[in-house]
Image: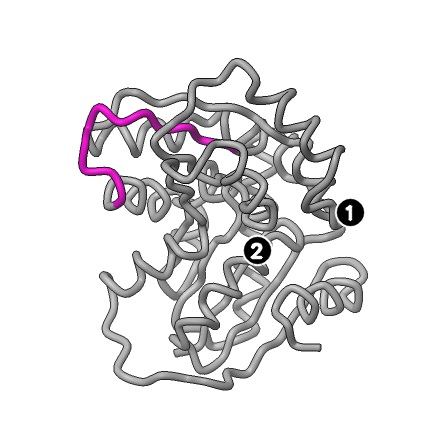
């Protein structure tokens, strides 16, 4: 299968990493809209317009499937993308909610959703989780984590201070949904902060779990072809991809 992965910037590379570890696709084409990142502070109509433009970009390739790695786009523009696409389009929000449900069998469990301002304001995760029977849902916009990850701050005093800023008055949850593709890169710090009993739900792993339930993958691809495109400074994106994917 030939896959397209769309993200507002570089964060979706964490989803690609999960996909590579499961060897599901023969070719992966990544497009990051780095010229207009971040999407998390933009209005709904703008997000939809950018998302449809991404679909137009992918029409240059004969794709079997598109994954929307960006949580903000998945929350606001998934239906419009599906209407514009010639192949199936899958978003990370539904996959993340289902992964949380699979990890938590107690419907009274406390779930904390982290994301950008736009993702949190959409209430997309809350809607999905409530449909699955969960009601004890807390949400928090944690946008400061995005530039920190892009500055490669994965640990240390600055990150610890930010964790305390966001969570000092937050009840320890049973699960935390990492509702932004940047956040898995600080997963170790989040796990240490909340403790070993809190389950972290990673968009990449959630997507893989969702795909394996939706499709039959009869072949493993150990060395898939990878192509990385960006709307601005593609070489910088490729450099980050090589580093995050341990290709250098």
Q: How many marks?
A: 2
According to the picture, the residue beneath numbered tag 2 turns out to be 12
**Residue at horizontal 18 percent and vertical 37 percent from the top:** 105
**Mark 1 falls on what kind of element?**
loop
According to the picture, the residue beneath numbered tag 1 turns out to be 151
**Mark 2 falls on what kind of element?**
loop
Please state the horizontal and vertical placement of residue 31, each as a whole percent of the image: 61, 62
Image depth: mark 2 or mark 1 in front: 1
> Which range of residues does the magenta coloring cover?
103-114
On residue 24, the disc is none
Q: Quadrant of residue 171?
A: top left
Does residue 148 show up magenta in the picture? no
- In this rendering, the answer to whether 60 lies above or below 16 is below
**Residue at horizontal 67 percent and vertical 66 percent from the top:** 241
Please state the horizontal and vertical placement of residue 182, each as a whole percent of the image: 60, 47
**Residue at horizontal 37 percent and vertical 41 percent from the top:** 199
Q: Quadrant of residue 176?
A: top left
- Residue 166 lies left or right of residue 200; in this view the side is right
Q: Earlier in the sequence, mark 2 or mark 1?
A: 2
Q: CA distance from mark 2 to mark 1?
A: 16 Å
- In this rendering, the answer to whether 40 lies above or below 51 is above
């Amino acid at each position: 299968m030939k896959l397209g992965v769309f993200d507002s910037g570089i964060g979706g590379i964490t989803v690609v990493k999960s996909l590579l570890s499961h060897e599901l696709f023969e070719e992966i084409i990544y497009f990051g809209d780095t010229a207009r990142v971040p999407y998390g502070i933009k209005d709904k109509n703008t997000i939809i317009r950018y998302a449809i433009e991404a679909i137009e970009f992918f029409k240059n390739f004969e794709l079997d499937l598109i994954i929307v790695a960006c949580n903000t786009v998945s929350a606001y523009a998934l239906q419009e993308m599906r209407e514009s696409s010639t192949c199936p389009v899958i978003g990370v929000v539904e996959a993340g909610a289902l992964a949380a449900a699979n990890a938590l069998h107690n419907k009274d469990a406390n779930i904390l959703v982290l994301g950008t301002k736009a993702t949190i304001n959409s209430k997309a995760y809350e809607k999905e989780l409530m449909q699955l029977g969960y009601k004890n849902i807390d949400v928090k916009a944690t946008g400061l984590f995005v530039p920190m990850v892009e500055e490669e701050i994965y640990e240390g005093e600055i990150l610890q201070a930010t964790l305390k800023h966001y969570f000092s008055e937050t009840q320890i949850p049973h699960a935390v949904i990492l509702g932004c593709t940047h956040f898995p890169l600080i997963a170790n710090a989040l796990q240490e902060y909340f403790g070993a009993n809190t389950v972290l739900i990673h968009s990449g792993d959630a997507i893989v779990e969702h795909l394996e339930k939706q499709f039959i993958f009869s072949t493993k691809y150990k060395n898939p072809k990878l192509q990385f495109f960006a709307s601005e400074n593609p070489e910088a994106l490729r450099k980050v991809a090589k580093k995050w994917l341990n290709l250098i």
